[in-house]
Image (cartoon, rainbow, N blue to C red):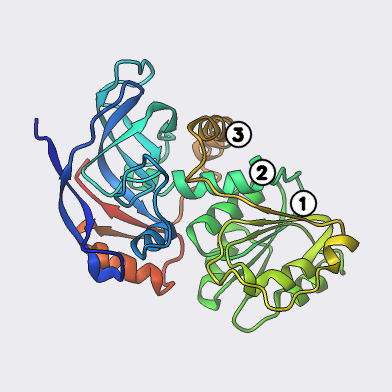
Amino acid sequence: MSKTMQSVQQTGTGGAETLYIGTSPKPLVKPTEVLIKVHFAGLNRADILQRQGKYPPPKGASNILGLEVSGTVVQVGRKVTNLTIGTRVMALLAGGGQAEFVAVDYRLVMPIPAPLNLTQAAALPEVFLTAYQALFFEGNTPKASRVLIHAGGSGVGTAAIQLAKAAQCTVFTTSSAGKIPACQHLGADVCIDYTSENFASVIAEHTKGKGVNLILDFIGAPYFAQNLQCLAMDGLLLMISVMGGVKLTETNLYPLLSKRLKLQGTTLRARSILYKEALINKFMEDIFPLFEQGKIHPVIDTVLDWHQIAEAHRYMEANKNTGKIILKISDP
């Protein structure tokens, strides 16, 4: 068996033109890992940031891009008893997914819910687990809450809308005008065009000044002041990313006190395997039945051959996608 494989490589940090398909060592499988032949891999904003040199992989993780895959188990570590060669699976990764093979701890490997195919499965782990983590694992969102989901047309946004609606929440989203129909189709109650509307004013109008209980924010500094305005008493602002910037210039912090607000940041990639295992197990228990019943589904914008990796990055950077961009690595 060959000791090398093809994978997404870089000539150096920078733009999409630095990406190419090259040769790298095939992963060695540790006793608690399985080796997956990758058929499809998801593309995420984290891949763009890593390509730019702004988001290095956690210590010990592969420096190859890719945080989620679907594929077939082709090798099993000696301590793994719950997975067998030939099983089709999906997996959450800290890196290494955009390659012909990836080694992953068995605790981060999931079965594919019955209605989903391998393409859809590759669109699930990173975004649905991030959304579930934010809404319920960290956010502790009660049923029938009012939730604001920024970047509603993104991969995480489209997952979060569906999960929040499944919990009978009233969902507000922000997106560009072109993505509003997709957000509405997924069940969002109020869709706000961030390019032409003040989302704090819209939410104040629709909630009669009560505000929302939880905000999932990917933008950061530019939205901070409006986010505080939007929150209800005892509300939570959960920061998942800071794509719009990290530095505040002038902000009134009084709402934090007057409304007893909570501000929390969360990440997933660098968490421990034990944390991810607990998250995955709870996710499978709570959410897998919704996939199996056809009540929720991964939203895929486009599927590209992985040799079009630079084109895929440019497409995401231009904010053209609604839902996931999937890379086809090999035939199932």
Q: Earlier in the sequence, mark 1 or mark 2?
A: 2
Front position among marks 3 and 2: 2
- Where the N terminus falls, by quadrant? top left
Instruction: Give the camera-side residue of 212 and 206.
Output: 212
CB within 8 Å, label 3 to label 2:
no
Report the residue marked by disc 3: 286
Identify the disc placed on residue 75.
Answer: none
- The residue under label 1 is which amino acid type? Ser
CB within 8 Å, label 1 to label 2:
no
- The residue under label 2 is which amino acid type? Glu
- The residue under label 3 is which amino acid type? Asp
- Where the C terminus falls, by quadrant? top left
Relative to 69, residue 3 above or below: above
Q: Earlier in the sequence, mark 3 or mark 2?
A: 2
**SS type, badge 2:** helix
Q: CA distance from mark 3 to mark 2?
A: 15 Å
Identify the disc placed on residue 145.
Answer: 1
User: For residue 37, what is the image quadrant?
Assistant: top left
Report the residue marked by disc 2: 138
**SS type, badge 1:** loop
Q: Which residue lies at the image location 55% right of the left edge and 58% below the top edge?
A: 157
User: For residue 108, what is the image quadrant?
Assistant: top left
Relative to 72, residue 226 above or below: below
Task: Return the residue found at the far front.
Answer: 59
Instruction: Report the side of 10 relative to 120 (left or right).
Output: left
